[in-house]
Amino acid sequence: MTVVTARERLLAAAVEAFAEKGFAATTTRDIASRAGMSPAAVYVHHDSKESLLYTVSLDGHRHALEIIEGAAASSDEPVERLRAMVRSFSRWHADNSRVGRIVQYEYHALSPEHRAEVAVLRRRIEQTMRDALTDGVERGAFAIDDVPGTAFAVLSLGIDLVRWFEPGGSQSGERLADLHAELAVKMTRA
C-alpha cells in the first residue's frame, strides 16, 4: 500500500485546481479543501500559492526534459530519433495533460526568479530538439531551412495538445503520439 504524504496531496490538489480554474482564480482555500486540509496547512509545506505552482512547473519541466533526452539517446539514426522524441514528448503531454496545461499556460504567473529557473529547462528541451534536427540536416536526412523555428513547431505538436486533450476521450494519447511522430517526420524529411 502506497502512503500519500500531505505534501503530495497538496501538490495533487494544486494540479487539479490550477488545471480547472487557472492559477489566478485558484485560492489556497481551494487547494486545501481539495487536499482535505485546512488553509493553514498549505503554508506548512509552501510559503505561497506561487510556491506550489513553481513546484508543479519545475517537476513537470524536469520530467519532460528527461523524456525528450531519453528519446534522443534511443537512436543514432536521425529519422528514428526524431520519431521517438516527438512520440515520447507528445505521449508525456497526453498522459500528464493537466500538469502540462499548468506547465505551459501558467508559466507567466511564476515569480521572475522561478520563471528564470524554469526557462533554463525549457531551453534545454528546445536545444535537445534543435541538436537532433541539426544532426539530421547535416546527415542529409532532413531538409530544414529554419532549425530553431522547426524545433518550436515540432515541440508544439505535443505542447498544444494539453489545451484540449482529455484522457478517456475519443483519441488515445498513444494514437496522438504516433500521429505527431509521423507528422514531424513528414515535416522534416529530405
Image: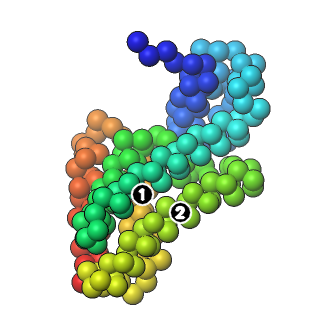
Residue 174: tell me if it is visible: yes
Secondary structure under badge 2?
helix
Rendered image: mark on residue 124: 2
Question: Residue 79: which quarter of the image?
Answer: bottom left
Question: Residue 146: which quarter of the image?
Answer: bottom left
Question: Residue 183: which quarter of the image?
Answer: bottom left
Give x and y (percent) for residue 157.
Answer: 37, 61
Q: What residue sits 29% from the left and 68% below the top?
A: 76
User: Of callouts 2 and 1, which one flags the residue occurring earlier in the amino acid sequence?
Assistant: 1
Rendered image: mark on residue 5: none
Give x and y (percent) for residue 133.
Answer: 37, 75
* Other residues around mark 2 within 10 Å, as few (<14) / some (14–19) / many (≥20): some
Secondary structure under badge 1?
helix
Q: What residue sits 54% from the left and 34% below the top?
A: 15
Q: Is residue 154 left or right of residue 32?
A: left
The CA distance from mark 2 to mark 1 is: 9 Å
Q: Is residue 74 left or right of residue 37?
A: left
Position of residue 166 relative to residue 30, above or below, is below
Q: What residue sits 40% from the left and 51% below the top?
A: 67
**Residue to which mark 1 is pinned:** 69
Query: In the image, what residue type sits under mark 1?
Result: Glu
Q: Quadrant of the C terminus?
A: bottom left
Color theme of the render:
rainbow
Query: In the image, what residue type sits under mark 2?
Result: Arg
Q: Cβ–Cβ below 8 Å for labels 2 and 1?
A: no
